[in-house]
Image: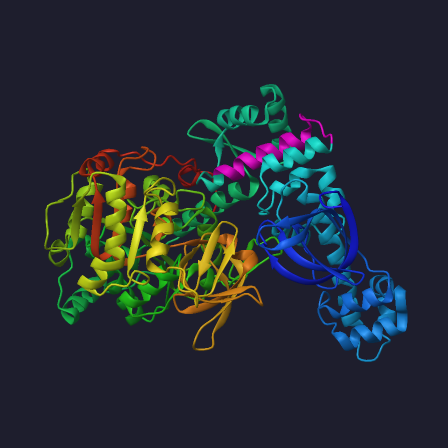
Amino acid sequence: MENSFTEITGTVEDIIYRNEQNGYTVFEIANGDDSITAVGLLPQIGAGDTVRVTGRFTNHHSYGRQFSVDVCEVCRPTETADILRYLSSGAIKGIGAKTAQLIVSEFGEAALDVMETQPERIALLKGVSLSKANDFANQLRQNTGVRSLMLYLGEYGISNSSAVKIFSNLGAGCVERIKENPYILCQGDFGVSFENADFIAKKENLDYDSNVRLRAGLVYILKHNERNGHTCLPLEKLSDTAAQFLSVEPDKIAACIEEMCFDRSLIKDTINEQKFLYLPQTHLSELYTASRIKMLLKFPLENISGVDEEIEKCEKEDGITYADKQKEAITRALTEGMLVLTGGPGTGKTTTLNAIIKIMKSKGRKVLLSAPTGRAAQRMSEVTGDEAKTLHRLLEVSWDKHDNPIFNRNERNQLSCDALIVDEVSMVDTYIIESVMRALPFGCRLILVGDSDQLPSVGPGNVLGDLIDSGIVPVVRLDEIFRQAQKSLIVTNAHKIVNGNMPVLSASDNDFFFLKRNNKIEISNVILDLCANRLPKAYGYSPFDNIQVLCPSKKGELGTVELNKQLQNILNPKLDDKAEVTIGSKTFRVGDKVMQIKNNYDIRWFKENGDTGEGIFNGDIGIIQKIDRKTKFLSILFYDKVARVSFDNCSDLDFAYAVTVHKSQGNEFEAVIIPMFSGPPQLYYRNLLYTAVTRAKKTLILVGNPATVEYMVNNNRRTKRYSGLKEFLLRDDGLY
């Protein structure tokens, strides 16, 4: 009877469609002599699986009669024919039709039990080694475990892709572990919120004020604040936030904090006479960095002789005269153990850097160059003429099973160099600078280059600001704009902005333009026209390679989400012969400009020269070259390397026709377009505008209301970050 609940047991013949983000699946199921089309939100299933589904038959207006699944249980096949079909389906890697037939012929209906519990018997079969048999057993156990976990977590709205990641980290028996302590789900990078874990805990009848919940909540709050840039939180702020967030009495929070401090799950420290709380790893990170920097400063290195003569020699060879501040920077870089070189655009940082490198190399010193991102390292290579590596590549990163970075260059395997120069250091967070300090050999100079007026790092900490503000690290600030740079309104207006002055908006024949528009629709239309028509025709710019729209916010009519929809429709519209795939709420097409929005250390890439590697990082921009529905992979060109990104990992991709200013850090673009319309003060402030303007190399266009520009220039709000590096640098505690 149509619309009545029915139970069907059968074999999955084919997966017609599957959304990996929410598990929505269309599949064919064989039930006796019938083949039925079924749809529903399901655990991971594959051709050959035996399933028991409960639901009802419905009539779809386009696809006709189909079975709508409410409950799906993946069953282990018990009949010989079903076992053969399952093993032949490719569900167990390494088993094809021939091996499947061999196993089933030998063991019949007991084949799967023997495979899982007695792999040594499988190894007696022709062509099957013991290592292969053990691998088959592990895969079978994992398939069973993953499916059980998917069924359990699916009831709570947790995606299948998250379940796979959770299983790979927690292993067998994870369902029981989660039932005992659901909060382990929000402690890893599994995409599970504390609220999700709370919901599971409630269903499992765990006490709301249990110690397990309070401890997990405190850790969750600290980790959440690390994502907002804080390495620590004031004791009172953490206590008040936790009491409100967890809806428990403050005295219970206080008792839990004391217990966690006692067992070193949290670290309490005093900064500026105020109590702060840290996660242990973060506290150690800042302490170690401070101690190594103090060691660099306390124990002088061998000076490079004849610095003045070398500076004069460089001036003659290059036909330039260095400013006094540049000479000071060169001298201190060659005589101090550490130097911070900072300054805005057009102040001669690159020229100064090249002189430092040239003199060091002429004195037989080995110099290594590095930057936080691939684009920044590439630009550093271009302006210096020497190879620059990303910090991850320099430190030879690998990854543990929890996706935590392991730097193979460390205190036991240090870099081989006499000087390390790191550019764009405003982007370097607490954990990265710690890793740099661990890999820095004794006797090596460290030169950090960056613009202290840029936005701070995406990761936790205020590294560049703390180093400068400490007053103990040698700092040279270049503040003179050189004559050549003075011709650029981008440069001069950037300096006006950072100094709190209105930029020149009236020029029409330079590189900085302001197009006044009065409402959001007009602004949006102008941006679309600039990208699709005006800039390509006037300058030959490509909207995919040269033009970048930068927005203060993701949300709203002029945020990245809405502008990306419009820009995709006009720059890369849907065509019958153009491959596309819908994953979650996004439809990706061949030719789309995309950005990786989260580090993924497992994605493999290759270059034309044959180099291969792993890892695509937060902020990397690329173009989709191919969409392969059969293998469920995208091929994306990121700068000079092609990466294969699985459909499962596409949740970490976003469109990049328009990106936030924060996401643009470390990148430069030929042309930058910025919408200017009123918004919240926490997003519309001076340093954000300055950072956006300084991303443009040749052309900068503001579109909108001049009052918004004035508001941002006058809003000298600084992002408040809690960190302890400055305090630890200033402590006379004997730690080196």
Residue 8 x, y percent position in the rendering: 78, 52
Residue drawn at (32%, 67%) of the image: 381
Residue 726 x, y percent position in the rendering: 39, 39
Total number of numbered discs in the rendering: 0
Left or right: where does residue 577 sit relative to residue 67? left
Which stretch did the figure color magenta?
205-225
As drawn, 708 above or below 308: above
Residue 645 x, y percent position in the rendering: 52, 62
Q: Does the image show residue 656?
A: yes
**Most foreground residue, 240 or 57:** 57
Left or right: where does residue 172 sit relative to residue 730? right
As drawn, 286 above or below 640: above
Residue 398 x, y percent position in the rendering: 55, 61
As drawn, 348 above or below 384: above
Would you say the magenta stretch is mainly helix, strand or loop? helix
Q: How is the image coloured?
A: rainbow
**Most foreground residue, 47 or 288:** 47
Left or right: where does residue 644 sit relative to residue 704? right
Q: Does the image show residue 693?
A: no
Which residue, as the protein is rendered here, is positioned at the far bottom? 126
Name which quarter of the figure residue 309 lies in.
bottom left
Left or right: where does residue 130 sit relative to residue 258? right
Residue 211 among those drawn in magenta:
yes
Residue 38 among those drawn in magenta:
no
Residue drawn at (13%, 62%) of the image: 321
Name which quarter of the figure residue 302 lies in.
bottom left
**Most foreground residue, 346 or 311:** 346
